[in-house]
Image (cartoon, rainbow, N blue to C red):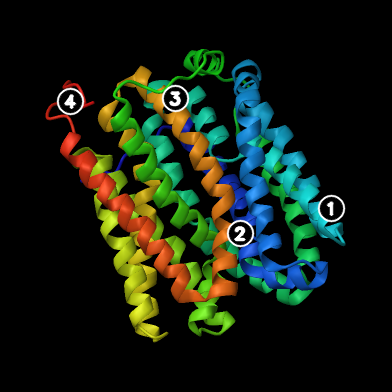
């Protein structure tokens, strides 16, 4: 199994983007660690506090079509520099808030910054540098950014315990200005190739439902149902482990291990990706997730049950991160893939926004068993949809997908 390497033109920006993406995604995950403290200090209920993450995703989605043209015109580097400054402002608003108004204003600001700096922006930057050869670099970036929770959950826990969550937000703002901003300014090339022309074409074109509508709806439903579970759990994972009975330090330790396991699943798929497609990856994940949650229900909070849950869930959710991007590739060519991916992004953004507050509400109001039963039902339904998609998989690379 050959490990891909990159020349300096790609390797330095890839390193820069890896560091800044870990910082970016790690810092916006703060409520997963200090959500209860935020709720107590701001006199808000916990679901409302976790709704900040929902605002982040909604705002990112709303900004996406507008920033697509800006990326094409100005290049990713300039947009990311501006977005990093906006992110610092967002964390300062959180640090200074005394109630819901500034709290949600902070998340609106962070959502605006996220649309300019997180994931998509990094992929566009790599595409500017490498064009058609950017696929492996983007895959490598996905591996590394999977470490964001493993790096920042323990950091957030230590900082919040030592200084409080408001001071932690101020430290995060400083990190944006003193670490991420200089990396973008000095670590990314000032001049890159023009942004991908297809980006302009897509942003200026009305996106329609792709061909083979029934297959498309199966894909969208399977991806969305699995995302409902993984996005919801990612926001409340520490609270989930505490509800099982783990003390906070152990919950943070188990939760931090999750990111490493997810990266391991992505690495296996990355290194052996030529041997299986997105459907195969999704099928594996579709088995792992409900089994993991069922074991947690019957395990009665034992450390061994929790450990097995974290491993299985980490492998499944890590594989799903890859499957979300690659399942449509099984059925659509380059032109139709762009249309399909754009259409899937809408329910995906909505689910990303809805699931965290819904999951924390289920956990706090109805208990862990009800939450896990809802998650199992969603994952099992997605698994059945993937089995249907497997029957429609084209027999040959150039075969037409079933309608």
| Dot label at residue 178 | none
Which dot, 1 or 3, sits closer to the camera? 1
Residue closer to the observer: 375 or 182:
375
| Percent of width and height locating residue 332 | 30, 25
- Mark 1 crowdedness (10 Å alpha carbons): few <14, some 14-19, many ≥20: few
- The residues bearing labels 1 and 3 have C-alpha atoms spaced at a distance of 43 Å
**On the picture, is 313 further left or further right than 101?**
left
**On the picture, is 131 further left or further right than 199?**
left
- Mark 3 crowdedness (10 Å alpha carbons): few <14, some 14-19, many ≥20: some
| Percent of width and height locating residue 322 | 36, 44
The residue under label 3 is 130
Is the C terminus in the top left, top right, bottom left or bottom right quadrant? top left
| Percent of width and height locating residue 200 | 54, 14
Q: Which callout, 2 or 1, points at the residue further toward the start of the chain?
A: 1
Q: Which callout, 4 or 3, points at the residue further toward the start of the chain?
A: 3
The residue under label 1 is 101
Contact between labelled residues 4 and 2, with CB atoms less than 8 Å apart = no
The residue under label 2 is 357
- The residues bearing labels 1 and 4 have C-alpha atoms spaced at a distance of 53 Å
Q: How many marks?
A: 4
Residue at the spot x=53%, y=79% of the render?
Answer: 243
* Quadrant housing residue 172: bottom right
From this view, report whether residue 344 is shown above or below residue 317. above
């Amino acid at each position: 199994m050959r490990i891909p390497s990159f020349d300096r033109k790609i390797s330095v920006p890839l390193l820069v983007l890896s560091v800044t993406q870990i910082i970016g995604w790690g810092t916006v995950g703060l409520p997963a660690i200090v959500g209860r403290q935020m709720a107590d200090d701001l006199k808000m209920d916990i679901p409302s506090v976790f709704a900040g993450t929902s605002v982040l995703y909604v705002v990112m989605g709303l900004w996406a079509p507008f920033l697509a043209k800006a990326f094409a015109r100005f290049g990713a580097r300039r947009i990311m520099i501006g977005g990093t400054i906006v992110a610092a402002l967002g964390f300062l608003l959180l640090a200074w808030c005394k109630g819901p108004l500034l709290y949600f204003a902070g998340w609106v600001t962070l959502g605006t910054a996220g649309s300019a700096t997180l994931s998509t922006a990094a992929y566009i930057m790599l595409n500017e540098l490498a064009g058609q050869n950017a696929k492996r670099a983007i895959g490598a970036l996905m591996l590394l950014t999977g470490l964001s929770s493993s790096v920042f959950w323990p950091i957030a826990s230590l900082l919040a315990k030592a200084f409080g969550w408001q001071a932690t937000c101020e430290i995060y703002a400083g990190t944006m200005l003193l670490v991420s901003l200089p990396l973008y300014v000095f670590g990314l090339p000032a001049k890159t190739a023009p942004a991908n022309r297809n980006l302009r074409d897509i942003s200026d074109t009305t996106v329609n439902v792709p061909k083979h509508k029934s297959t498309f709806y199966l894909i969208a439903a399977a991806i969305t149902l699995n995302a409902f579970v993984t996005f919801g759990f990612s926001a409340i994972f520490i609270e989930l482990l505490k509800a099982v009975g783990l003390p906070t330090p152990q919950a943070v330790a188990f939760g931090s291990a999750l990111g490493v396991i997810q990266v391991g699943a992505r690495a296996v798929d990355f290194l052996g990706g030529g041997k299986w497609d997105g459907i195969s990856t999704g099928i594996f994940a579709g088995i792992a997730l409900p089994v993991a949650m069922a074991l947690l229900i019957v395990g009665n909070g034992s450390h061994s049950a929790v450990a097995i849950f974290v491993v299985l869930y980490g492998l499944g959710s890590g594989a799903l991160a890859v499957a979300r991007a690659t399942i449509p590739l099984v059925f659509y060519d380059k032109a139709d893939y762009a249309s399909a991916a754009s259409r899937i992004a809408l329910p995906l953004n909505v689910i990303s926004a809805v699931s965290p507050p819904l999951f924390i509400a289920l956990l706090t109001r109805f208990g862990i068993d009800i939450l896990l039963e809802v998650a199992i039902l969603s994952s099992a339904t997605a698994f059945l949809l993937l089995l249907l998609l497997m029957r429609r998989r084209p027999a040959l690379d150039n075969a037409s997908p079933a309608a």
